[in-house]
Amino acid sequence: MPRVAVIEGDGIGPEVTSAALRVLAHVCARYNIDDIELVKAPAGDTALRVYGSPLPEESWRAIRSSDAILKGPVGETAGEVVVRIRRGLDLYANIRPARCMPGIECLRPQIDLIVVRENTEDVYIRAEYLHGDVAIALRVISRRASERIARVAFTIARTRRKKVTIVHKANVMTVTDGLFRKVVREVGEREFPDVEIDEMYIDAAVMDVVRRPERFDVIVTTNLFGDILTDLAAYVSGSIGIAPSANLGDNKAMFEPVHGAAFDIAGKGIANPTAMILCTAWMLKWLGEKFNKKNYTEAGNAIERAIEKVLGEKKVLTPDLGGSATTQEFTTKIIENIQ
Ligand code: ATP
């Protein structure tokens, strides 16, 4: 029985999560899915206020014993919650697709790429030291982590346009990025000879994501560069409210919207739940593959089709997309369009 931990999060988190759970309940009934066990796992700023910890022990237990985590955005405590889950469960691959959805005004309509970001190393290991007036940070890049993230990127590329671009700065960080580039290339050449390998410096890559994103299919990169590149790609492909992401490990996965807690619009009922609903669809497809359940995959696809239809019609949209619908009205429209 697939077990899913649900983190509502902060700010607009509870609103978009409740919208996503409404869609999930509907699609489960429609596709005869009756075996998902949902467990609420409070985490984030609200959890800190109520339970004295951003990730209370009981939540961590629920998360650890789940197959998948559906996570809403977390506010100030995001670092503590997200980093602990990613590292604690070894969710080493952060996957963020960026493509122009129907009906969405995109800076570059031709964008259709996936960023595969290494999620566990780099300067994000948080080993920073202060020696008097000098601050020092450690950057860790290992062969093992580079190999496994490379495999994820090449495997995804095989299902798409068969091209992987390694993004790095090996001309300056010759040892760390030098190793990353070398190992990713080796994996590609040895195990995925049918996939084209390309590489770019990070500074050139950010320019091209804006200028000519069609040159990219799958980008594989280290943690910090990936963090920056993915927000940029989300912006180029339209509203931040529509971009989902996944953190994948070998047996567990966490799905979360790219956007943050957006406190400025929290409680107003106008948040766009698209990213969170797309996370739910992605999670169903991932669970479908893991548990070999076709109806899960079909349910995930049905959600995606309904979202594309509603966005494409441009009639019922939330204010961030130029409409006047509330979160709940938009969600109802999605549900009505699930075939
Ligand atoms: P963080 O610092 O964690 O990234 P944030 O709330 O400061 O979080 P973003 O999530 O990047 O930043 O959002 C920036 C702005 O975009 C928000 O303040 C909000 O106005 C808008 N926004 C973000 N997500 C949504 C959404 N789902 N629906 C509508 N507007 C959104």
Image (tube, rainbow, N blue to C red):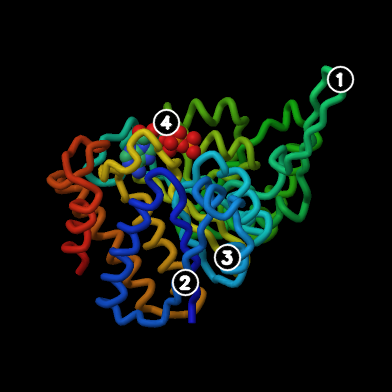
Disc 3 element: helix
Three-letter amino acid code at the position of disc 2: Leu
Instruction: Report how far apart the C-alphas of labels 1 and 4 lie in the structure.
Output: 45 Å
Whether pointer 1 and pointer 4 mark residues with C-beta atoms closer than 8 Å, the reply is no
Front residue of this view, candidates 205 and 140: 140
Q: Is 134 positioned to the left or the right of 330 in the image?
A: right
Lower sequence index among marks 1 and 3 = 3
Q: Is 331 positioned to the left or the right of 267 in the image?
A: left
Whether pointer 1 and pointer 3 mark residues with C-beta atoms closer than 8 Å, the reply is no
Which residue appears at 78% of the width and 51% of the height? 143
* Image position, residue 163 (x, y; %): 52, 48
Front residue of this view, candidates 178 and 43: 43
Identify the residue position indicated by label 3 in the image: 63
Instruction: Report how far apart the C-alphas of labels 1 and 3 lie in the structure.
Output: 40 Å
Disc 1 vs disc 2: which is toward the camera?
A: 1
Instruction: Report how far apart the C-alphas of labels 2 and 4 lie in the structure.
Output: 34 Å
- Image quarter for ligand 1: top left
* The residue carrying mark 2 has its beta carbon less than 8 Å from ligand 1: no
Instruction: Report how far apart the C-alphas of labels 1 and 2 lie in the structure.
Output: 50 Å
Q: Is 188 positioned to the left or the right of 244 in the image?
A: right
Lower sequence index among marks 1 and 2 = 1
Identify the residue position indicated by label 4 in the image: 212
Three-letter amino acid code at the position of disc 3: Ile
Q: Is residue 161 visible?
A: no
Identify the residue position indicated by label 1 in the image: 132
Lower sequence index among marks 1 and 4 = 1
Disc 1 element: loop
Whether pointer 3 and pointer 4 mark residues with C-beta atoms closer than 8 Å, the reply is no
Which residue appears at 59% of the width and 57% of the height? 152
Instruction: Specify the label residue 287 is tagged with.
Output: 2
Disc 3 vs disc 4: which is toward the camera?
A: 3
